[in-house]
Amino acid sequence: MKTEYIILKETTLNNNCPECYSTDGMILSFKQQRLKSKFLVKTKSNIVESINCNKCENQIFPGQWTTDIERVYDYHKKTITRQSGSLRFTKLFYILLLLAITIAAFLYIYLYRPDLLGI
Ligand SMILES: [Zn+2]
């Protein structure tokens, strides 16, 4: 399975980075995880939030957030719309399914109704 992220929102924060104190390096992002295989695509309903600083290249974990960061985070959290969790099959899955049904039907006719095939 391949993991992809759907970016729901990505925004630059102008708060001080708890690591390097720069005021224009932090990016807050809200993502949803999507797992892909050849046959299915699964979208998880939970949202993965993270804050990364471009200046010092650290991930800023919630324990390090200042109250200002929390306030901005809460504000942005309210503005995002998540996609509902889902599980769907890929085109390849349906093609193979159709192929399997066709083969099964053909085998059935071949074994039980060979007269239909003119044999
Ligand atoms: Zn930083």
Image (cartoon, rainbow, N blue to C red):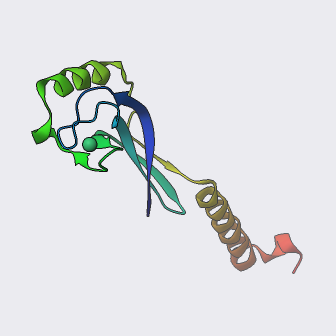
Residue 54 pos. (x, y %): 36, 44
Which quadrant, please, contains the N terminus?
bottom left
Q: Nearer the viewer, residue 110 or 59?
A: 59
Q: Nearer the viewer, residue 106 or 95?
A: 95
Q: Residue at 15%, 39% (x, y): give it.
A: 62
Question: Quadrant of residue 19 in the image?
Answer: top left
Q: Is residue 45 above or below residue 23?
A: below
Q: Residue at 62%, 56% (x, y): give it.
A: 94
Which quadrant, please, contains the C terminus?
bottom right
Q: Nearer the viewer, residue 104 or 44?
A: 44
Give the side of residue 33 with respect to residue 93, left or right.
left
Residue 118 pos. (x, y %): 89, 75
Q: Residue at 22%, 31% (x, y): give it.
A: 16
Give the side of residue 92 with respect to residue 80, left or right.
right
Question: Quadrant of residue 97 in the image?
Answer: bottom right
Give the side of residue 84 with respect to residue 52, left or right.
right
Which image quarter has ligand 1? top left
Residue 7 pos. (x, y %): 44, 38
Q: Is residue 86 above or below residue 41?
A: above
Question: Quadrant of residue 68 in the image?
Answer: top left
Q: Is residue 97 above or below residue 43?
A: below
Q: Nearer the viewer, residue 100 or 119?
A: 100
Residue 80 pos. (x, y %): 37, 24
Q: Residue at 12%, 24% (x, y): give it.
A: 67
